[in-house]
Image (cartoon, helix red, strand yellow):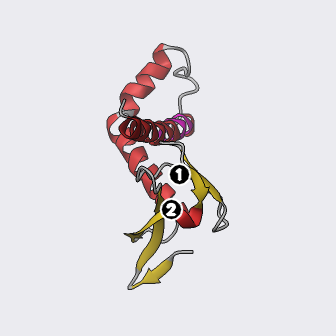
Amino acid sequence: MPDVIGGETVEAVYLCPECGSPSVDYPEAFGTVAECQACGWVGKQDQMLVTPLVHLEGSKENIVARLTGDIRMIIVKHFAVPFGRFLMQWGFVTQENLSKEVMGRYIAAATLAVLKATIITRQEMEKERVRGN
């Protein structure tokens, strides 16, 4: 559970004790088994390295909302018009059914896809760093 100190949220980031990677899967219950996706270490969460993470976002949900919002703004500002042209060119939308709602759905889907791809790529890069690839 995060602590709030002076308006800032302080949470813990758990790192693998073998390789230092943050790419560790662990259940919410403390003391349960954790597994590093980078080096393969398996052990208890209380064996992991812990470092505080201080932010103003308030909760994990707020962090995801902020990440998603930041990516969405990049897409809206720099990608929406060419993306709309692409959708029309390839028949995903037509002039008749093109609306703010339709584009909003496509942009929301693109936003989530970009965020997911970014996180997956970061995890893959972490595995490569640890394994020396």
Q: Residue 97: give x, y in percent of width and height.
A: 58, 26
Q: Which badge, 1 or 2, comes first in the chain's sequence?
A: 1
Q: Is residue 124 above or below residue 2?
A: above
Pointer 2: what residue?
48
Residue 2 bears which disc, if any? none
Left or right: 38 as drawn, with respect to 102: left
Quadrant placement of the N terminus: bottom right
Q: Which residue is mark 1?
A: 24
Q: Is residue 98 above or below residue 108?
A: above
Foreground residue among 36 and 88: 36
Give the residue drawn at x 53%, y 28%: 98
| Position of residue 122 measured from the top left corner of the image (x, y, whole percent) | 41, 41
Q: Find out whether the residues at labels 1 and 2 contact each other: C-beta distance under 8 Å.
A: yes
Q: Residue furthest top?
A: 90
Outermost residue, left direction? Answer: 78
Q: Position of residue 25 (x, y in %)?
A: 58, 51
Q: Is residue 6 left or right of residue 109?
A: left
- At x 65%, y 63%, the residue is 28
Whether 90 is among the magenta residues is no
* Three-letter code, disc 1: Val
Element marked by disc 2: loop
Q: Residues within 10 Å of mark 1 (few under 14, many from 20)?
A: many
Which residue range is magenta in the image?
105-111
Please tell me how many numbered marks the rendered image carries: 2
The chief SS type of the magenta part is helix
Q: Residue at x 49, y 35 (%)?
A: 110
Amino acid type indicated by mark 2: Met
Please report the residue visible at 67 percent of the width from the left and 62 percent of the height from the top: 32
